[in-house]
Image: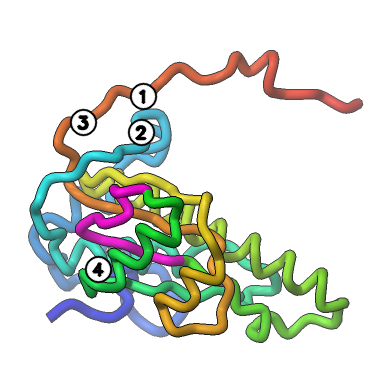
Amino acid sequence: MYPSDIFSRLYAGEEGDKLYPKEEEPVEGIEDVLQTNIFNVMLNRRSQRKFEDKPVEDWKTEMIFAAADTAPTAGGFQGFEIFNVKSAEIKAKLVEGANRQPYVNAPVVLVFCMNPARVKLNFQPEIIKKFSVQDATLAAAYSQLAAHALGLSSVWIGMIDEKKVMEALGTELVPSSVLCIGYPQKMLQAKPKRNLAELIHTVQ
C-alpha cells in the first residue's frame, strides 16, 4: 500500500530531518523517477493531445499529487484544490465546458480550482484571489512536469467555461485550468523555444 505522502520515502528519522538514503527500500520503479533530472524533464516535455486507451497506474497519479503538494504557495497556505475526475459522465461534461476539446476526455483528468478561503493573509479579497490563482497554477505546472518524469504526457487546458466546469464538478470553487494526462500514442519531440537573448530583459 502506498503512503499518502509518497515523497516521505525520501526522509527518515524525526519530522524535518533529511537522511539519505532512507533504510526502507522504495517501491519498484519509484527510485528511478525520484532521480530524474529536472532539466531533462523541462527540456523534453511537450503537450500531447492523443492518448492511448490505457489506464494510468494509481502510484503514478499519487506521485503527481505529491508533486503538486510541493508547489510554492502564498504564505504556504495552499489556496487550491484538485479534482481527480474519474467519471466518464463528468468527463463528457468537462469536454463541453472546455470548448468541446475532445482530448479533455483523457485517462486522467485533473481540475485545479482556486480556494482563496485557505489563504489566511491580511490582504484585500482581490489580492487573496490573485494569490489563489497563482497557487493553483503552480500546482498544475508541478503536476505537468511530474507527469512527464513518469513517462506520461499531458495537455494544459486553459480555455474553459468556469460555470460549466463548476456545475460538472458540483463545486463552488472556481477552476483555473484542467490538466489532461495519459500515455501518449506517440512521444512528441520538444519544439524549439525563444532565444534567451529575446526572452530576458536585464534591468541594472
Earlier residue among tags 3 and 2: 2
Task: Give left or right: position of 54 versus 104.
Answer: left
- The mark that comes first in sequence, 1 or 4, is 4
Give the quadrant of the C terminus.
Answer: top right
Q: CA distance from mark 2 to mark 1?
A: 5 Å
Query: What element does badge 4 sit on?
Result: loop
The residue sitting at 73% across, 85% down in the picture is 120
Instruction: Report, in whole angstroms, how far the alpha carbon at label 3 lies from the one at label 2.
Output: 8 Å
Q: Amino acid at mark 4?
A: Lys
Quadrant showing the N terminus: bottom left
Q: In the rendered structure, which segment of residues is drawn in magenta?
A: 101-111
Query: How far separated are the C-alphas under marks 3 and 4?
Result: 34 Å
Residue 89 seen in this snapshot: yes
Q: Is residue 129 above or below residue 20?
A: below
Q: CA distance from mark 1 to mark 4?
A: 35 Å
Q: Are marks 2 and 1 in contact (CB under 8 Å)?
A: yes
Q: What residue is pinned by disc 1?
A: 190
- Residue 75 in percent (x, y) is at 70, 73
Instruction: In the displayed orientation, state which residue is furthest to the right.
Output: 204
Residue 22 marker = 4
Residue 77 location, quadrant = bottom right
Q: Which residue is mark 2?
A: 46
Q: Closer to the camera: disc 3 or disc 4?
A: 3
Element carrying mark 2 = loop
Q: Position of residue 11 (x, y in %)?
A: 34, 71
Q: Are marks 3 and 4 in contact (CB under 8 Å)?
A: no
Q: Which amino acid does the dot numbered 1 rest on?
A: Ala
2 or 1: tag closer to the N-terminus: 2
Q: Percent position (x, y) of residue 38?
A: 39, 41
